[in-house]
Image (cartoon, coloured by chain):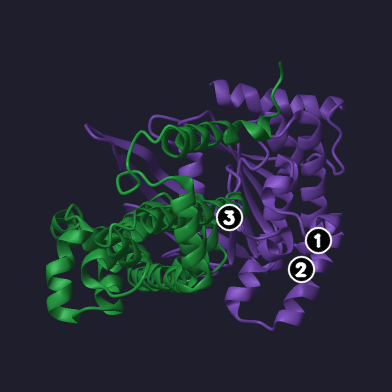
């Protein structure tokens, strides 16, 4: 049985700049099922990051509600881990302490936290970086640590805002594969914002295609490509073409 | 000719010492009570060192500087974090901080004597007044410049408002706070010596003013140079700390 994880109802959101008001999102409705991998895809300025931040509780909608397991979202929570586009590791903590941050402030026992953090770091092959500080890591490693930091924290949902956009293509592909592995193992619900069609087709079950001025949902594309997905395959390219077609409409 | 870089800083001091020796001891251009010759300074230094007075006054001054800085930090750092994280409080404190800050610390000397008498306490009060504002302003600045993404990351990891302040905003501001302390130490040292000259019966400032009252220019020079060396030492220590806290 499929269970609703996030329910977005009639969302409106606008921002004031110094001289005018810009409507970022208008009449957004969306249901996200538990365990789904959703990509939100659209051109810059379509409000996709705003939509993700609303789900994260980092912004409050002007109108409408967002529900998580049936209750209204009023602010950020550890239930909704957020991976930012910018690097967001705490520069004064080493990798292990960064990963344990959520557990530590949650008040669970130190021994347990260390064990849990180390287990997760090992699972993604980062065990050798434990004592390194963020400035000693590559961009890709920083984002992997950020993902682990949310996973360790028992977040049921991961909200990811173009986390791999600053990373070179080869490493980006590796990170995408790793993310799929993590997702399959954890059964997390993932909401992933991107402007990269290839990335969306590779990752998502459902691709939310957005248009702009003001931001709205154009279409929800159900991506039935079998996993593991191959970028070179004919079907993959076909889906990609189809998506580009819808976006350009 | 190539000169090794680490000798470069020594060239100018050596030239000054040589000119000093030639000007005073050899050519005797000025009397020793105007500019003391090296031998006079050496004699005074010897006496101050072996009598234990130099060490005692140095420790006395250092103690005051550190105690003044400590009290200023205890007040200014939490206050800076508070003001930096609430624009309403910052707005409310704007005028009082704006008016108190430009007052030179030594201008507090009359009141410090009235309130605390003569001795260690008024000096510490002066150092407090001199260093509390730089530490406050730097802390406030560091807090306000905390990367927003770090705060949001903390929120989505489950941190409450208090944890955001203590676990994220405070550590993020530490490099800026250290810069503030570095500035405050310099001001604190100046304040101490000024305060000691007027409202104290111990310390290097007192040593200098006492020596000059007795026309002991040698001891005056020793006192001044010791202050310079203390400043240099603080600078060195803070550079080490900064190297550790700037990521």
**Eyeballing the image, is B205 above or below A41?**
below
Q: Say which residue label 2 marks.
A: A117
Q: Going 39% across and 67% down the picture, which residue do you hit?
A: B65
Which chain is green in the picture? Answer: B
Q: CA distance from mark 3 to mark 1?
A: 26 Å
Is residue A67 in view from this perspective? no
Q: Nearer the viewer, residue B162 or B104?
A: B104
Label 2 sits on a secondary structure element that is helix
Q: Are marks 3 and 1 on the same chain?
A: no
Residue A186 percent coordinates (x, y): 77, 63
Q: Nearer the viewer, residue B215 or A84?
A: B215
Q: Say which residue label 3 marks.
A: B245
Q: Assess disc 3: are there few (<14), some (14-19) or many (≥20) residues with their C-alpha within 10 Å of its C-alpha.
A: some
Q: Going 71% across and 15% down the picture, which residue do you hit?
A: B1
Label 3 sits on a secondary structure element that is helix
On what subunit does the disc labeled 1 rest?
A
Q: Nearer the viewer, mark 3 or mark 1?
A: 3
Q: Nearer the viewer, residue A242 or B214?
A: B214
Q: CA distance from mark 3 to mark 2?
A: 25 Å
Residue B31 percent coordinates (x, y): 32, 42
CB contact under 8 Å: marks 2 and 1:
yes
On what subunit does the disc labeled 3 rest?
B
Residue B90 percent coordinates (x, y): 24, 59
Disc number placed over residue A121 in the picture, else none? 1
Which chain is purple in the picture? Answer: A
Q: Assess disc 1: are there few (<14), some (14-19) or many (≥20) residues with their C-alpha within 10 Å of its C-alpha.
A: many
- Horizontal arrangement in the rendering, residue A142 relative to residue A47 (left or right): right
């Amino acid at each position: 049985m499929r269970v609703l994880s996030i329910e977005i109802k009639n969302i409106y959101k606008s921002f004031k700049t110094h001289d005018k008001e810009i409507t970022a999102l208008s009449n957004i409705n969306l249901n996200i099922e538990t365990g789904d991998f959703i990509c939100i895809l659209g051109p810059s300025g379509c409000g996709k990051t705003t939509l993700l931040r609303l789900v994260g509780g980092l912004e409050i909608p002007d109108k409408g509600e967002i529900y998580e397991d049936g209750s209204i979202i009023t602010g950020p929570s550890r239930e909704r881990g957020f991976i930012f586009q910018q690097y967001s590791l705490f520069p004064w903590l080493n990798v292990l302490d960064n990963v344990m941050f959520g557990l530590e402030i949650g008040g669970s026992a130190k021994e347990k936290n260390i064990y849990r953090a180390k287990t997760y770091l090992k699972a993604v092959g980062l065990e050798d970086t434990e004592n390194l500080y963020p400035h000693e890591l590559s961009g890709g490693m920083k984002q992997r640590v950020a993902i682990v930091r949310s996973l360790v924290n028992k977040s049921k949902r991961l909200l990811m805002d173009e986390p791999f956009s600053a990373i070179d293509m080869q490493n980006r592909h590796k990170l995408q594969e790793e993310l799929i592995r993590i997702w399959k193992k954890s059964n997390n619900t993932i909401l992933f914002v991107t402007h990269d069609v290839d990335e969306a087709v590779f990752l998502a079950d459902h691709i939310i295609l957005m248009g702009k001025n003001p931001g709205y949902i154009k279409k929800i594309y159900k991506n039935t490509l079998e996993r593991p997905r191959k970028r070179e395959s004919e079907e993959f390219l076909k889906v990609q073409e189809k998506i580009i077609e819808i976006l350009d409409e | 000719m190539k000169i090794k870089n680490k000798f470069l800083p020594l060239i100018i001091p050596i030239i000054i010492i040589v000119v000093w020796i030639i000007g005073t001891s050899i050519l005797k251009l000025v009397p020793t009570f105007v500019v003391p010759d090296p031998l006079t300074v050496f004699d005074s230094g010897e006496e101050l060192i072996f009598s234990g007075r130099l060490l005692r006054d140095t420790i006395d001054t250092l103690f005051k500087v550190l105690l003044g800085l400590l009290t200023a930090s205890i007040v200014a750092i939490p206050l800076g974090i508070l003001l930096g994280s609430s624009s309403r409080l910052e707005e409310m404190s704007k005028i009082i901080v704006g008016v108190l800050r430009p007052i030179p610390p030594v201008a507090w000397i009359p009141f410090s004597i009235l309130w605390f008498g003569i001795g260690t306490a008024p000096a510490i009060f002066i150092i407090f007044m001199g260093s509390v504002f730089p530490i406050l302003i730097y802390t406030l600045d560091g807090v306000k410049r905390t990367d927003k993404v770090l705060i949001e990351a903390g929120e989505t990891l489950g941190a409450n408002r208090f944890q955001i302040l203590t676990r994220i905003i405070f550590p993020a501001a530490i490099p800026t706070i250290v810069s503030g302390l570095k500035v405050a130490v310099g001001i604190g040292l100046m304040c101490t010596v000024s305060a000691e000259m007027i409202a104290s019966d111990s310390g290097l400032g007192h040593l200098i003013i006492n020596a000059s009252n007795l026309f002991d220019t040698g001891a005056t020079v020793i006192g001044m140079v010791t202050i310079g060396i203390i400043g240099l030492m603080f600078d060195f220590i803070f550079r080490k700390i900064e190297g550790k806290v700037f990521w």
